[in-house]
Amino acid sequence: MLRFTSLVYAHKPDMAAWLSSWALDFAARTPDCVPTATFYPEPSAPAYVEQALGRGARIFKAHVQVGDYDPRDPLLDPVWALLEDAAVPVVIHCGSGPAPGRFTGPEPVRAVLRRHPRLRLVVAHMGLPEYAEFLDLADAHEGVHLDTTMAFTDFTEEDAPFDRALLPRLRDLGDRILLGTDFPNIPYPFRHQVEALERLDLGEDWLRGVLLRNAERLLGRARNAERLLG
């Protein structure tokens, strides 16, 4: 592991700003940590997101299920616009697993992308259990990526198996699949996530991209945006 993120997310108003500040302070004193921030639909969101970008945030986290908010909320429109212009990716938990929320699933995200088509989104957990639908989104929008957190592992395959008929699509989108782990909050050894990817048997180049190169490329774009903002 060369770099890691300290993904944080808000579940109520008036906490995202200080969460972002903490995460950015942590990254500043932890050389291997990618500067991370978050947001929540509230009037102050554009100001603190812009401030976080100015402090070098290179990735954001949004959790639609835990936050119980609609990503289409008008309060988030200026936030999405800021992140779109900065080319800074957002890891977004928007699939309906492990339990559906009021605003989970592909349709709210699809609506956001209609308004902000250049957004760089990283759909957490491969969008489980709506794997096919989120692959469709990635097919339609070149900025949409998917991360592998918990997907393909024995733990997840019991309740939300990935349809092996989708493997050719997964291979074809290989440059937009990223390693995700949720480490250390996982019910299996860290190595098992990598083993689960290996046993998909999609080739060494695909695996190398997922484990390293795709994240390097995505965060490299964010780093270039950081230079422009600076």
Image (spheres, helix red, strand yellow):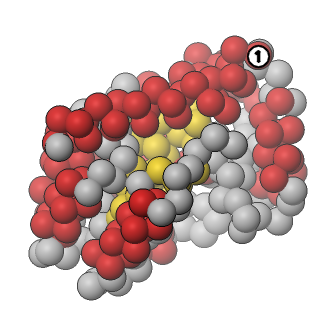
Look at the picture and state if 14 lies above or below 228: below
- Left or right of 48, for residue 147: right
- Left or right of 101, for residue 185: right
Count of marks placed on residues = 1
Q: Foreground residue, 89 or 31?
A: 31
Look at the picture and state if 174 lies above or below 188: above
Which residue corresponds to mark 1?
Answer: 204
* Figure quadrant of the C terminus: top left
Residue 37, percent from left and from top: 36, 62
Residue 176, percent from left and from top: 51, 28
Residue 71 visible from this viewpoint: yes
**What residue appears at the point 54 percent right and 22 percent down from the top-left corner?**
175
Residue 75, percent from left and from top: 15, 67
Q: Is mark 1 on a helix, strand or loop?
A: helix
Q: Foreground residue, 5 or 2?
A: 2
**What residue appears at the point 69 percent right and 43 percent down from the top-left corner?**
1
Image quarter for residue 228? Answer: top left
Give the crowd class for mark 1: few <14, some 14-19, many >=20 residues within 10 Å. Answer: few
**What residue appears at the point 26 percent right and 41 percent down from the top-left corner?**
226
Residue 126, percent from left and from top: 59, 44
**What residue appears at the point 24 percent right and 47 percent down from the top-left corner?**
83
Q: Foreground residue, 72 or 17?
A: 17
Give the residue type at disc 1.
Answer: Glu
Look at the picture and state if 63 lies above or below 136: below
Look at the picture and state if 33 lies above or below 65: above
Residue 103 visible from this viewpoint: no
